[in-house]
Image: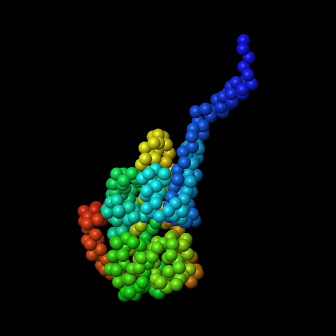
Amino acid sequence: MKKRGPKIIHILISLAILFGMGLWNSPAAAKEIVIKLAHPNVPQHPMGEGYELFKADLEKRSGGVFRVDIYDSSKYGNFDAVVQGLQMGVLQMGSDACNNFSVFNPQLMFLDMPFIIPSYEAADRITDGPIGKKLASALEKNGILGLGYIDIGFRQVFSSRPIRKLEDAKGLKIRATHSKAHIAILKALGMNPTPVAWGEVYTALQQKTVDAIDIDLNLAWFNKFPEITKYVTLTRSFYSGHLVLVSKPFWEKLSPQEQTWINESFAVMQKFERNKIRSNESMIIQKIKETGGEVIELSPEERARWIKATEEVAPAFAYAVPPELIEEMRKTVQEK
């Protein structure tokens, strides 16, 4: 009988160990799947924390099949870079404000319409229901799949002078995004919207290039805007959401089990992120008050005046967000 050499014996021993440990057909023995995930927020923001939870949950849930590398604070690049990366499959996941995706489908400006969504519960009914799902699915032809929506929050006015009534807003030089709907809302309220790049906002407020910013409580707090704007008026003019996306070329290469793991981990992240955004708001308001800031709540009568002042904004964008979509949103909001 021919003697087996040391090399053959070593291989047989290694195989026996693998079988004994149950690793021969385990996920750990398979090639690791890397997900590059890009988002624009700082790590300490609830969105940043949510994505860290997604990473931990998916890596554990999949038994090491997936590894998630997070590019926070727009480190991967701007919106265009993220979209191109997703379309090419070199970036596997990302998220951005819904209105940015209106370049692919104008109806994704639907959340920018003023004073339609009164609460987070109503926002969930719209984004998690048929409206949100239909609009997200429209991106598929562009090589992008929508997993679902997470919160940014409701817009409030942070300013260097008090805004207690509509007349106080007149002529206020306020930072605006490049969203045409956002600019139209601010103009309808008598303000002077001034587009400023996100990375330059703090300096612009500090140097009085602008006197205010229209932003949600969490983004304002984690970017330290209350340090340089003494007043915050709780206008809740419109709700902002982020659409979480996955590259279609990447998704189609995954097995059904791998796709299920991602969906399950996203659901965990979505619930956490939404809860944290919402529960943070009372803490932020209290902290602003404790540090010498003033929080102004509009009376129901005054709020009605702000709503009336912006009532022509939605009709002006009927070419993008048709009246039937607005009506469907209003009906959805009223559901119990």
Residue 140 visible in the displayed image: yes
Pick whichever, 145 or 215, lies toward us. 145
Give the quadrant of the N terminus. top right
Residue 326 visible in the displayed image: no
Taking 164 as reference, is 55 above or below it? above
Residue drawn 53% across the image and 57% down it: 51
- Where residue 67 sits in the image (x, y, percent)? 57, 48
283 displayed left or right of 249:
right
- Where residue 160 sits in the image (x, y, percent)? 49, 85
Give the quadrant of the C terminus. bottom left
Pick whichever, 125 or 181, lies toward us. 181
Taking 84 as reference, is 155 above or below it? below
Residue drawn 31% across the image and 77% down it: 310
- Where residue 279 sits in the image (x, y, percent)? 51, 66
Q: Quadrant of residue 135?
A: bottom left
253 displayed left or right of 5:
left
Residue drawn 34% across the image and 80% down it: 187
Q: Quadrant of residue 6?
A: top right
Pick whichever, 246 or 220, lies toward us. 246
Taking 194 as reference, is 112 above or below it? above
39 displayed left or right of 145:
right
- Where residue 191 sits in the image (x, y, percent)? 38, 83
Residue drawn 37% across the image and 78% down it: 186
